[in-house]
């Protein structure tokens, strides 16, 4: 077995994931009356409004740590553009025809930056519309625009996470890597050959 994620990285990921679920549910509860029943999960409407922004801060800080940890793995490299051009091979699991990829493929890297931009948008807009502490510092037009931006970024990040979960289920072994922290030699060689070769070289050194 090869270690793909150490315990600190896995904890960091799951803190981000759990707070994301909390924020998605509480945000939907406040977004539309038809989903107001979701507020019962958090102790009612008042508690939902109180907890949502604080959970948002926890998620942002946790995600920021993930960015620092994995930034260097998500830089675009030679072969990423070609990987995207061969999407038909990607979707049909013809990985032997694809360029060798490192720890993350081009699709995962795009997802990383979509999440990063969305998180920044959510933080900035969330501060503006946080009525208890900051909203009264801004003109009403700015608050209204921030509320619209917040909803747009939330929609983008929910869609991105759905894609992320689907991809993790589609590539068997991906979820296990984030639960146990390890993958088999075969999995690493098949899905991330450049990363696998680097790990083997470092092990020999």
Image (cartoon, grey):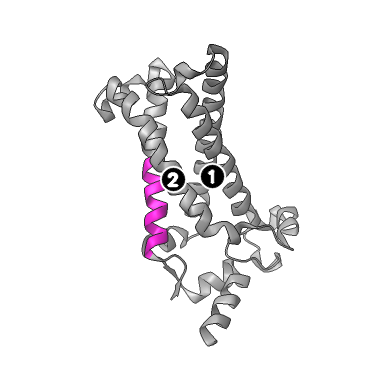
Q: How many residues crowd mark 2 within 10 Å: few (<14), some (14–19), many (20+)?
A: few
Name the residue rendered at 73%, 62% in the picture.
79
| Quadrant of the frame with the N terminus | bottom left
Q: Residue at x 71, y 53 (%)?
A: 84
What secondary structure is found at the residue carrying circle 1?
A: helix
Q: Is residue 104 left or right of residue 14?
A: right
Q: Residue furthest front?
A: 137
Q: Where is residue 12 in the image (x, y as percent from the top left)?
A: 40, 54
Quadrant containing the C terminus in the rendered view: bottom right
**What is the magenta segment's predominant secondary structure?**
helix
- The x, y position of residue 89, in whole percent, is 69, 58
* Residue visible at 37% across and 30% down in the picture: 52
Relative to 41, does residue 131 appear above or below in the rendering? above
Q: Are marks 2 and 1 in contact (CB under 8 Å)?
A: no
For disc 2, the marked residue is 61
Task: Report the front residue among 127 and 44.
Answer: 127
Residue of label 1: 163
Given residues 156 and 83, the one toward you in this image is 156
Looking at the image, the residue that sits furthest to the top is: 140
Task: Please say if 47 is above or below 123.
Answer: above
Asked whether 15 falls inside the magenta stretch, the response is yes
Please tell me which of labels 2 and 1 falls first in the chain: 2
Tell me residue 109's x, y (percent): 61, 53
The verdict on residue 16 being magenta is yes
Relative side of 44 to 144, left or right: left
Q: Which span of residues is magenta-colored?
A: 7-19
Q: Residue at x 34, y 24 (%)?
A: 49
Q: How many labels does the image show?
A: 2
> Which element carries disc 2, helix, strand or loop?
helix
Task: Residue 98: tell me if it is visible.
Answer: yes
Which image quadrant for residue 95?
A: bottom right
For the residue pair 162 and 46, the one nearer the viewer reads as 46
């Amino acid at each position: 077995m090869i270690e793909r994620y150490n315990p600190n990285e896995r904890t960091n990921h799951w803190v981000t994931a759990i707070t994301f679920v909390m924020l998605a549910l509480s945000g939907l509860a406040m977004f539309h009356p038809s989903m107001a029943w979701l507020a019962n999960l958090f102790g009612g409407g008042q508690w939902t409004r109180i907890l949502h922004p604080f959970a948002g801060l926890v998620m942002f800080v946790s995600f920021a740590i993930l960015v620092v940890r994995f930034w260097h793995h998500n830089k675009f490299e030679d072969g990423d553009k070609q990987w995207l051009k061969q999407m038909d091979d990607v979707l049909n699991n013809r990985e032997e025809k694809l360029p060798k990829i490192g720890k993350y493929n081009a699709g995962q890297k795009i997802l990383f930056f979509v999440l990063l931009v969305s998180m920044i948008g959510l933080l900035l807009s969330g501060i503006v519309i946080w009525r208890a502490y900051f909203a009264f510092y801004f003109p009403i037009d700015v608050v209204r625009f921030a509320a619209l931006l917040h909803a747009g970024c939330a929609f983008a990040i929910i869609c991105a996470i759905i894609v992320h979960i689907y991809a993790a289920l589609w590539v068997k072994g991906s979820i296990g890597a984030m639960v146990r922290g390890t993958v088999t030699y075969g999995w690493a060689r098949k899905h991330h050959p450049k990363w696998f070769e680097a790990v083997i070289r470092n092990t020999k050194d």
